[in-house]
Image (spheres, helix red, strand yellow):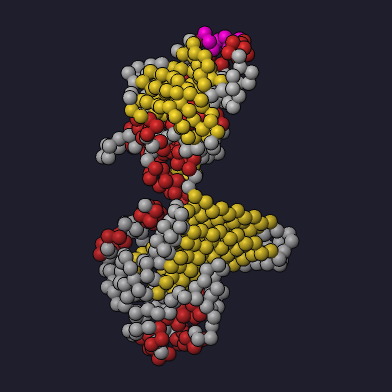
């Protein structure tokens, strides 16, 4: 299915794509329904960023064919450094739109853990996927981009951790993008059933400098009662994408969801990260770092919504802006009526490295319950000249001093990333971007 | 032997002149104490020599072995052999003490000749032990959450690791209890010798019980108004500053008041 623009895609194209992948009929119907609603649904309205002129719908082609990898040895060098081949038993690699490699330890297979590309999951675990796919997390008809995602989904992964299973080794997913015609409509669906625990890291990596497609990405994380999920990401998508990335979590009773998000895209990006603390006594912690450069425009909306009693939500975002990059950091803590004894905390800090860089931190607390606590802190500033003076007074050059201060500024989040290779990669990407 | 020469140094902050012509010559193997009441320009002298961004040198010169220090960037001054133990060291989140010190040491070495990690750790551990510091402090973020005394010890640790030619110690004794004062002094005395000179700024004579200066200078109204040997410090201890003011006809010793 090769088309020039989205407008050239027809209902029939969607149907044949879905059927060609032997998707269950509910999925075909879901895609077609979403496609039918595209025209009438509104665009999302990220606060303080005007996206009316952004192109979210035109792209050269829906899917590209790329080669699979028969072993980790065949990976390109840029990907190899992210993977500890000997130790990493649980890994999925998608090459542009092609599921290219998957492995899951025998132990986890025996325990009933499911870890597979989204097409295989739709075929082999149809009922389970249907139960969670765009139901409790993101709704298909939230707005035009969620519907577009559902209609055009062309990749992704499904992770299911059964009740009482604790996955000790992290699960790693790498979405490799090296074709400048490719578009990524990837869907990650992670379900951690009652009393389970898992650490998951997904990595979007463009190895082309410039590209022409769309990145419309949704990750849904369902954390059921008393389960614990650590969800890490490092996104390094190339300039030229229009990136819409929606990462959403839902927690059950006593559940814990920890996000560690490294947003290193070179594309214009709208990022929505929402955590619904539904179950009583559940927790959601968000740590995010961003580096913007060039003329990049980005909007990062992070929202924790407290529905359950005694829920704890924390947002920590640090952003560095250089050149003429501009970013909006919206942090929203929302406590619904009835969510007594809940606590919503957030901190956003933006460091600007040049005169023309822009950063805007907007902390918002929306509270419909009296018996709660909440707090926020936000700052936007430049590198402290006294810090530079102190470091330079020990012989460190200005450039190196700035590097140390910037790394230090981002360290609280970088250090949270659970996979060493990915942490190192994030450090290197930061190094490259702030230089 | 190295020599640091400060000649007729005038320094202003926010347009207000603080130093009004300071003259001092310090050689290696010498320890000079600069004393004086608060507000007489002592810390300004320290900051101006190191190149603090807020202090503007309006005239005069500072030379290290004939090289124009004032023409150098802050890092070049450090590379040339100057060190300032600061009164209020900055806190830097996310940068460990150890990483910072290694960067500082390597900044003095050509590329490819960086200090080996083993050697660095060995030196760091031995100096931290010497200064009776908790070894965990190497992995803590630079000065973040350090107590006043820990910060001062950390300044001396940096001094010992970096081995400069000249160290300016800006009120290293302020806020220290007697035990910490002894440790800090021990560090400075350890540095004492052929290749090392120091300018010790204090307004308490107490520090000089532990670090015996070769020369003592008194600052008032942004100038050095009196110089002498260690006996001058003892006289100040016994009699205070009033006799100097009387001798020189000074009524208010702080900057901005003219004699």
Magenta stretch encompasses residue B137: no
Q: Is residue B153 above or below residue A188?
A: above
Q: Which image quarter: residue A10?
A: bottom left
The location of residue B44, given as percent across then percent down, is: 51, 29
The location of residue B116, given as percent across then percent down, is: 31, 36
Q: Give me the residue at 50% from left, 37% from top.
A: B54
Q: Quadrant of the N terminus of chain B?
A: top left
Which secondary structure dominates the residues rendered in magenta?
helix
The location of residue B189, given as percent across then percent down, is: 44, 18
Furthest residue to the right?
Answer: A370
Q: Toward the viewer: B53 or A405? A: B53
Q: Residue B67: in sight, yes or no?
A: yes
The location of residue A427, given as percent across then percent down, is: 39, 52
Please report the bounds of the magenta region as a residue range: B231-238
Q: Residue A289: in sight, yes or no?
A: no
**Image position of B55 (left or right of A204):** right
Q: Give me the residue at 27% from left, 68% from top.
A: A70
Q: Which image quarter: residue A155?
A: bottom left
Magenta stretch encompasses residue B232: yes
Q: In this view, does B97 lie above or below A76?
A: above
């Amino acid at each position: 299915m090769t088309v020039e623009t989205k407008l050239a895609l027809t209902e029939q194209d969607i149907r044949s794509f879905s059927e060609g992948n032997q998707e269950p009929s509910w999925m075909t119907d879901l895609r077609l329904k979403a496609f039918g609603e595209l025209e009438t649904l509104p665009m999302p309205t990220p606060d303080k960023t005007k996206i009316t002129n952004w192109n979210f719908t035109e792209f050269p082609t829906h899917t590209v064919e790329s080669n699979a990898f028969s072993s980790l040895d065949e990976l390109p060098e840029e990907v190899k450094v992210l993977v500890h081949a000997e130790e990493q038993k649980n890994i999925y690699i998608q090459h542009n739109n092609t599921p290219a490699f998957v492995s899951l330890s025998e132990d986890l297979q025996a325990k009933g853990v499911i870890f597979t590309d989204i097409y295989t999951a739709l075929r082999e675990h149809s009922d389970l996927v249907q139960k969670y796919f765009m139901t409790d997390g993101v709704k298909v008809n939230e707005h035009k981009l969620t519907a577009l995602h559902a209609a055009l989904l062309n990749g992704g992964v499904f992770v299911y951790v059964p009740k009482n299973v604790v996955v000790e080794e992290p699960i790693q997913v790498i979405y490799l993008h090296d074709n400048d015609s490719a578009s990524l409509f990837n869907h990650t669906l992670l379900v951690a059933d009652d009393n389970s625990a898992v650490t998951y890291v997904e990595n979007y990596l463009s190895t082309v400098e410039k590209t022409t497609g769309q990145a419309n990405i949704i990750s849904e994380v369902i954390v059921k009662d008393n389960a614990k999920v650590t969800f890490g990401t490092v996104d390094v998508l190339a300039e030229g994408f229009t990136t819409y990335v929606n990462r959403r979590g839902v927690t059950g009773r006593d559940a814990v969801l920890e996000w560690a998000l490294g947003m290193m895209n070179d594309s214009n990006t709208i990022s929505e990260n929402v955590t619904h603390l539904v179950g009583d006594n559940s927790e959601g912690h968000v740590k995010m770092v961003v580096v913007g450069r060039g003329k990049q425009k980005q909007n990062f909306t992070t929202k924790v919504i407290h529905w359950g009693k005694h829920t704890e939500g924390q947002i920590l975002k640090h952003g560095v802006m250089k050149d003429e990059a501009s970013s909006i950091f919206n942090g929203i803590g929302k406590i619904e009526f009835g969510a007594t004894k809940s606590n919503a905390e957030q901190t956003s800090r933006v460091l600007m490295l040049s005169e023309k860089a822009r950063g805007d931190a907007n902390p918002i607390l929306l509270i419909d319950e009296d018996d709660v606590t909440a707090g926020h802190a936000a700052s936007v500033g430049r590198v402290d000249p006294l810090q530079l003076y102190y470091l330079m007074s020990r012989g460190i050059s200005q450039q190196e001093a700035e590097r140390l201060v910037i790394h230090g500024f981002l360290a609280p989040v970088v250090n949270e990333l659970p996979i060493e290779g990915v942490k190192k990669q994030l450090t290197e990407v930061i190094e490259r971007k702030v230089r | 032997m190295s020599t640091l020469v400060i000649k007729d140094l005038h320094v202003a902050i926010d347009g207000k002149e603080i130093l009004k012509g300071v003259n001092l010559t310090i050689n290696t193997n010498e320890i000079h104490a600069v004393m004086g009441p608060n507000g007489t320009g002592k810390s300004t002298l320290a900051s101006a020599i190191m190149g603090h961004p807020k202090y503007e040198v309006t005239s005069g010169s500072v030379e290290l072995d004939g090289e124009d220090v004032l023409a150098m960037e802050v890092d070049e001054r450090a590379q040339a052999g100057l060190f300032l133990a600061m009164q209020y060291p900055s806190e830097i989140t996310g940068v460990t003490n150890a990483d910072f010190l290694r960067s500082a040491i390597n900044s003095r070495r050509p590329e490819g000749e960086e200090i080996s990690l083993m050697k660095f750790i060995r030196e760091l551990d031995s100096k931290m032990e010497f200064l009776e510091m908790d070894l965990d402090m190497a992995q803590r973020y630079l000065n973040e959450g350090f107590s006043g005394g820990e910060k001062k010890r950390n300044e001396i640790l940096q001094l010992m690791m970096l081995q400069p030619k000249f160290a300016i110690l800006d009120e290293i004794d302020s806020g220290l209890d007697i035990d910490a004062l002894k440790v800090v002094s021990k560090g400075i005395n350890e540095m004492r010798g052929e290749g090392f000179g120091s300018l010790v700024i204090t307004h308490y004579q107490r520090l000089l019980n532990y670090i015996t200066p070769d020369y003592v200078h008194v600052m008032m109204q942004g100038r050095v108004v009196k110089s002498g040997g260690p006996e001058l410090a003892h006289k100040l201890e016994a009699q205070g500053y009033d006799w100097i003011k009387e001798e020189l006809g000074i009524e208010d010793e702080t900057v901005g008041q003219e004699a």
